[in-house]
Amino acid sequence: MKELRLNLKPLLRKAFLITKKDITGSEDRMTGSGKKQVGSRRALFGAKGFEFEKFREFVPGDDAEKIDWIASLRAQKMLVRVYSEEQNKDIIFFLDVSSSMSYSSHGKLKNEYAAELVATLCFALADSGDNIGLVMFTDHIINVVPPAAGKQQFMRIVRELTNPTYYEGNFDLGKSISQLMRFEKKSAVIVIVSDFIGLKPDWEHMFNTLASPQYEVIGIMVRDPMDNQFPEGHYIGQIVIADPFSNDQLLMDPNRIAKKYKNYNEEEIDKIKNVFRKSKSGFLMLYTDELFMDKVARLFGKT
């Protein structure tokens, strides 16, 4: 791939405005150490965020919804649950840079869109205290930015995202997940960014292995509108299409297969969504002709 055209400036400006406030709307919030924290993985990803620490006796002014009635009956006094904020985790952006991502029907390549998305999320999380890393893969892992915190890490990730030598290649999500788990052995949030095109039969098994208590998994499917359906009445006669992972070509009439093509892709997307749903993993679908910041903003609860 010769060049990636990323337009980050307006995205980062909007990301700053979103992360300027926490999920409750206050400008900054204090961590347990007294340090100001702007934005967090909890606000961004809707992750669990808090874990049970202990019970304490109910006092006037407490939220009645926090009362644990079973524990209260056992203790013969009103008890509320006390939670502590989770420790910071590694956040790994697991980015598909295979050949099918180098496609666009309207000007913005999927890999450009995905790179802008990852860069924007890294910027939003740069002050969260979490360690942020990047793993780029095709049919194997080809580049790793080990997790670290802060703005310098964000700049390093942007440099790697804009390096065209990492892009293009075959696709094997299952094999790449296996390699990822050998690399990232401690608890982490794994954000898979891919078009999920060209999945091999064993991918679901490897994904379910990844989606264990050790890892929080979030899938972000990035697709071009043409990945899912052909525009009706747009084509006259036959066209030649090419397999992004080989040199194979096929002569076809889009108007004759449009319905089957659409139905097939809808079924495949539903299968992928169900895999994430069954594993209680997060899932977000984006198209390259839409502004992803609007959906990211909703994750922050700011729209």
Image (cartoon, rainbow, N blue to C red):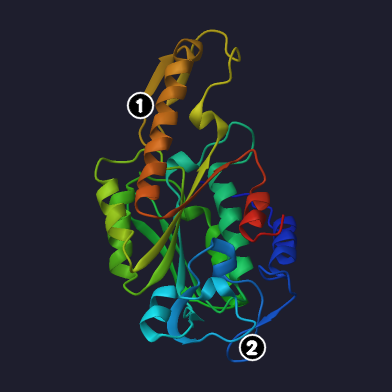
SS at badge 1:
loop
Q: Residues within 10 Å of mark 2 (few under 14, many from 20)?
A: few
Question: Which amino acid, mark 2?
Answer: Lys
Please name whichever residue, 188 or 226, is drawn nearer the observer in this view of the structure. Answer: 188
Residue at x 54% of width, y 62% of height = 45
Query: Which residue is painted at 32% across and 55% down in the image?
Result: 176
Residue 206 position within the rendered picture, expressed as x and y whole percent measured from the top left: 27, 53
Instruction: Please identify the quarter of the rendering in which residue 197 is found.
Output: top left
The residue that appears at 43% across and 29% down in the rendered structure is: 265
Q: Look at the picture and state if 237 lies above or below 218.
A: above
- Picture quadrant of residue 69: bottom left
- Circle 1 packing at 10 Å, graded few (<14), some (14-19), many (20+), is few
- Residue type at tag 1: Asp
Q: Position of residue 255 (x, y in %)?
A: 51, 11
Which quarter of the rendered picture does the C terminus lie within? bottom right
Which of the two residues, 58 or 150, is positioned nearer the viewer here? 58
Whether residue 229 is situated above or below residue 158 in the rendered picture: above
Q: From where the camera sits, is residue 162 visible?
A: no
**Residue 267 position by quadrant:** top left
**First-in-chain label (1 vs 2):** 2
Q: Are the residues at dot 1 and dot 2 in contact (C-beta closer than 8 Å)?
A: no
Distance from label 1 to label 2 (Cα)? 57 Å
Question: In the drawing, does residue 192 fall left or right of residue 226?
Answer: left
Q: Which residue is mark 1?
A: 248
In the figure, 32 relative to 86: above or below? Answer: below
Q: Mark 2 sits on what residue?
A: 35
Q: Secondary structure at mark 2?
A: loop
Count of picture labels? 2
Q: Is residue 68 above or below residue 99?
A: below
